[in-house]
Amino acid sequence: MMNEIIQNMKERRSIRKFKDDIVPKSDIEQIIEAGLYAPSGRNRQGVIIVAVTDKKTRDEFSAINCKIGGWQDGFDPFYNAPVVLIVLADKTIPTYVYDGSLVMGNLMLAAHSMGIGSCWIHRAKQEFEMPEYQQFLKKLGIEGDYEGIGHCVLGYADCELPTAPERKNNRVFFVE
């Protein structure tokens, strides 16, 4: 019998079509908590999460993400997901990109374990280099020099759950 956590890791896939159904706040909070327990260099815990459930704000982030990505107006790079967890990391910490990436991984695994779909959406770095998004953080009371690591979009899948492709060979080397 395979360990439940390892099974979760093997089965989690990115979802790219979501239902409109709202994810309960208590579930979002549990997922965020799991993200905040990710390892960080020297336990500095320099990663923050901005949870966006307000549709207007979510749609504004989707629109700027679409523009940065070079898609036509109207494309939703968040795939209709009703929740966007924006992961940002303190750029003064040497391991900030790695730390933020580990948070993203924990968020996606926690969501999957709860029957909630997720997908890592890029371009948060470019968004939070823009003055209006730095202002957005200041309005939330967030001070410091943060870089956007990614958006973890969450929701209930409106599609068949993808299966994992076969793993490539010759990717592990033992020195015994």
Image (spheres, rainbow, N blue to C red):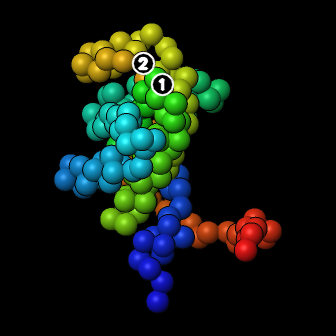
The residue lying furthest to the top in this view is 131
Asked if the residue at tag 2 contacts the one at tag 1, i.e. Cβ–Cβ closer than 8 Å, the answer is yes
Q: Amino acid at mark 2?
A: Asp
The residue lying furthest to the left in this view is 26
In the image shown, does 21 or 14 lie closer to the viewer? Answer: 14
Whether 164 is drawn above or below 16: the answer is below
The residue lying furthest to the front in this view is 176
Residue at horizontal 49 percent and vertical 14 percent from the top = 130
Residue at horizontal 80 percent and vertical 68 percent from the top = 170
Relative to 175, 19 lies left or right: left
Secondary structure under tag 2 reads: loop
In the image shown, does 150 or 20 lie closer to the viewer? Answer: 150
In the image shown, does 170 or 151 lie closer to the viewer? Answer: 170
Q: Quarter of the image holding residue 157?
A: bottom left
Percent position of residue 17, x then y: 49, 53
Percent position of residue 38, x then y: 39, 50
Q: Residues within 10 Å of mark 2 (few under 14, many from 20)?
A: few
Q: Residues within 10 Å of mark 1 (few under 14, many from 20)?
A: some
Residue at horizontal 19 percent and vertical 53 percent from the top = 26
* Marks 1 and 2, the one that precedes in the sequence: 1
Whether 14 is drawn above or below 8: the answer is above
- Name the residue tied to disc 1: 91
Kindly tell me whether residue 161 is visible in this rendering. Answer: no
Residue at horizontal 73 percent and vertical 71 percent from the top = 174
Task: Name the mark on residue 11.
Answer: none
Percent position of residue 51, x then y: 31, 37
Q: Amino acid at mark 1?
A: Lys
Between the residue at mark 1 and the residue at mark 2, the CA separation in whole angstroms equals: 6 Å
Secondary structure under tag 1 reads: loop
Percent position of residue 68, x then y: 59, 24
- Name the residue tied to disc 2: 145
Q: What quarter of the picture does the C terminus occupy? A: bottom right
